[in-house]
Image (cartoon, helix red, strand yellow):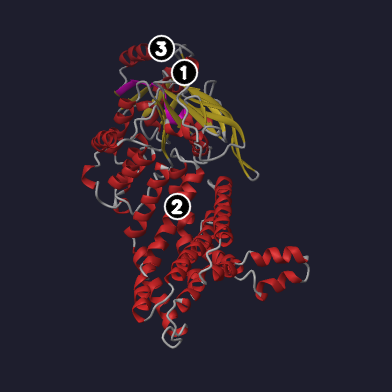
């Protein structure tokens, strides 16, 4: 048993999750191949990656469910292998698929979690009321979990993970199976909890990263291939600062495209004949919106819409995880 | 300790939340009655003791205890709740012991519900109640041994049916370790002292001693050691295979 108190070293307190060279092999297959990172308070870290990239295995190693083949992980300065109980006391973990004991009601289930976590009955009542309200579980509190919808089951799993108000939360696909409204609520919940805490979520919904994360790590084939702020990630898109024109049906797309090609600030032009759009890619670092706007005005192009692209996360994701270059020329 | 208690409480609740508890208890009571009166000849013997009742317990346990034990870990594994349990601030020992104690307690309840037969025999004659108490203790200890074996095998399997069958087979071997059925297999090639060691592992030999009213420390320790060893093996198996 290791009920040691939190270490008082201020340096350690600052890195609430530390992963160092995590490796996991299953037989001859390497699921995670040397992942290292640290997370500091206030960060909401999004784990992205194609299915099978090693997101879940990494999270399981952080939570102490999978034993790493090599490397180690710390939660609030406690090694998950050496001092598992102390580390797990500070961790709220939502496993993939939000498993629970199906025959129990959410109330009994959360009571069990509270008991195991050693919450006093007063604290438990207060914390229970809090999660029930935040996750809107009131209506189903006394129905067996196995009879609940997928959305409710996911929220019961979330309630279990955040019940004890932990400083570190690792949530594997927290919004999977939720409808758009519920997704929105869970994202708001995550943002509300974030100050002073560490939250790691995995997802393959890219907007989610943009919406809630302060930092994104993209994993492919068990390795970290990108570790940046979501905005910086978007800037890696070749669409970043490109200008897209949508034209009326009557327009001569090819003429427009060739006029655009004539501009010195435009590096490349793409035509989408189905969508009646023309996209102009600028020479690095040049803003071309006003230039193109002026040109459209002069030439009287029948423009329906003109907009500046921020960048496309899905395109960045695809090119990073399939190994194509992103920042360079197309 | 508080952690183990909450695990025990949760497990026991889950037994009674499903038909499992009811079915098990009814079948346990029905079969133990059937064996005692029909096969054991409770009345025909004309003796005021519970020997026919306790004689059949090993055979009853051989099939009923693995049925309880098979779900201990295989079900957690199948439903994925094992990931939840192991990532709570719980040591493997606490989890293994908690789940074992809950199942053992449950069997103890079923066993306690056979009390009418004790009342009956006291009504009909004047039995040696000391022997009966000893036999009840021996019976419960033996059930614990079966259960610990089942716990370990359940931890190694995701499939409950496989866990059940393997547990029955291993329990059967342990039960009859002192009998020719098992010993003949070893006698050809195992040296004498080791053969004696195998024979001394027999559940039946130790149980028979206790159920005759001889509650010797040796036999009690034997069962506790069996339980401890298999539970320890359970933690090792879990540690190695928890995420598979």
* Residue marked by disc 1: A8
Are discs 1 and 2 less than 8 Å apart at CB?
no
Q: Residue furthest bottom?
A: B44
Q: Which residues are magenta?
A: A305-316
* Residue marked by disc 3: A287
Is residue A314 rendered magenta in the image?
A: yes
Q: Is residue A328 above or below residue A152?
A: above
Q: Position of residue B181 (x, y in %)?
A: 66, 75
Q: Is residue A190 above or below residue B122?
A: above
Does mark 2 fall on the same chain as mark 3? no
Q: Residues within 10 Å of mark 2 (few under 14, many from 20)?
A: many
* Residue marked by disc 2: B99
Q: Position of residue B35 (x, y in %)?
A: 44, 80
Q: Is residue B18 above or below residue B32?
A: above
Q: Position of residue A320 (x, y in %)?
A: 52, 29
- Chain of the residue under the numbered disc 3 shown in the image: A
- Chain of the residue under the numbered disc 1 shown in the image: A
Q: Secondary structure at mark 1?
A: loop
């Amino acid at each position: 048993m290791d009920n040691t108190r939190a270490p008082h070293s201020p340096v350690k307190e600052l890195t609430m999750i530390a992963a160092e060279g995590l490796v996991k092999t299953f037989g001859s297959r390497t699921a995670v191949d040397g992942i290292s990172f640290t997370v500091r308070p206030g960060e909401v870290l999004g784990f992205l990656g194609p299915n099978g990239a090693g997101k879940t295995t990494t999270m399981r190693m952080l939570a102490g469910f999978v034993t790493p083949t090599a490397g180690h992980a710390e939660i609030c300065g406690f090694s998950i292998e050496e001092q598992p109980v102390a580390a797990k006391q500070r961790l709220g973990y939502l496993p993939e698929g939000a498993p629970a004991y199906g025959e129990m009601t959410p109330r009994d289930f959360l009571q069990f979690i509270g008991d195991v976590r050693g919450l006093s009955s007063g604290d438990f009542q207060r914390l229970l009321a809090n999660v029930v309200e935040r996750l809107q579980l009131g209506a189903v509190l006394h129905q067996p979990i196995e009879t609940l919808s997928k959305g409710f089951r996911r929220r019961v799993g979330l309630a279990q993970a955040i019940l004890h108000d932990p400083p570190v939360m690792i949530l594997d696909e927290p919004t999977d199976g939720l409808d758009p409204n519920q997704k929105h609520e869970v994202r708001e919940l995550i943002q509300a909890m974030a100050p002073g805490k560490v939250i790691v979520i995995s997802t393959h919904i890219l907007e989610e990263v943009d919406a809630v994360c302060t930092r994104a790590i993209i994993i492919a084939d068990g390795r970290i291939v990108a570790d940046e702020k979501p905005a910086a990630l978007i800037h890696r898109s070749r669409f970043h600062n490109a200008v897209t024109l949508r034209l009326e049906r009557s327009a001569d797309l090819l003429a427009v495209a060739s006029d655009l090609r004539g501009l010195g600030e435009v590096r490349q032009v793409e035509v989408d004949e189905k969508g009646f759009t023309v996209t102009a890619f600028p020479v690095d670092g040049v803003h071309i919106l006003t230039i193109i706007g002026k040109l459209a005005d002069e030439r009287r192009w029948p423009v329906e819409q003109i907009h500046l692209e921020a960048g496309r996360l899905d395109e960045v994701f695809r090119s990073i995880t399939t190994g194509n270059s992103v920042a360079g020329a197309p | 300790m508080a952690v183990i208690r909450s695990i025990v409480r949760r497990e026991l609740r889950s037994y009674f939340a499903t038909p499992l508890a009811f079915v098990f208890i009814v079948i346990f009571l029905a079969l133990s009655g059937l064996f005692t009166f029909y096969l054991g000849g409770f009345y025909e013997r004309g003796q005021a003791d519970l020997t026919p009742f306790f004689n059949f317990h090993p055979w009853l346990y051989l099939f009923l205890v693995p049925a309880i034990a098979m779900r201990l870990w295989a079900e957690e594994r199948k439903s994925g709740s094992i990931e939840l349990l192991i990532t709570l601030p719980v040591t493997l020992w606490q989890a293994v012991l908690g789940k074992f104690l809950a199942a053992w307690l449950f069997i103890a309840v079923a066993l306690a519900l056979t009390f009418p037969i004790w009342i009956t025999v006291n009504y009909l004659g004047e039995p040696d109640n000391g022997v009966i108490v000893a036999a009840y203790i021996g019976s419960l200890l033996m059930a614990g041994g079966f259960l610990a074996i089942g716990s370990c095998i359940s931890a190694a399997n995701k499939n409950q049916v496989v866990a059940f069958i393997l547990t029955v087979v291993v329990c059967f071997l342990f039960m009859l370790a002192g009998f020719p059925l098992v010993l003949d297999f070893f006698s050809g090639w195992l040296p004498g002292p080791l053969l004696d060691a195998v024979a001394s592992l027999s559940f039946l030999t130790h149980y028979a001693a206790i159920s005759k009213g001889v509650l010797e420390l040796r036999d009690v320790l034997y069962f506790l050691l069996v339980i401890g060893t298999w539970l320890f093996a359970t933690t090792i198996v879990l540690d190695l295979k928890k995420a598979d």
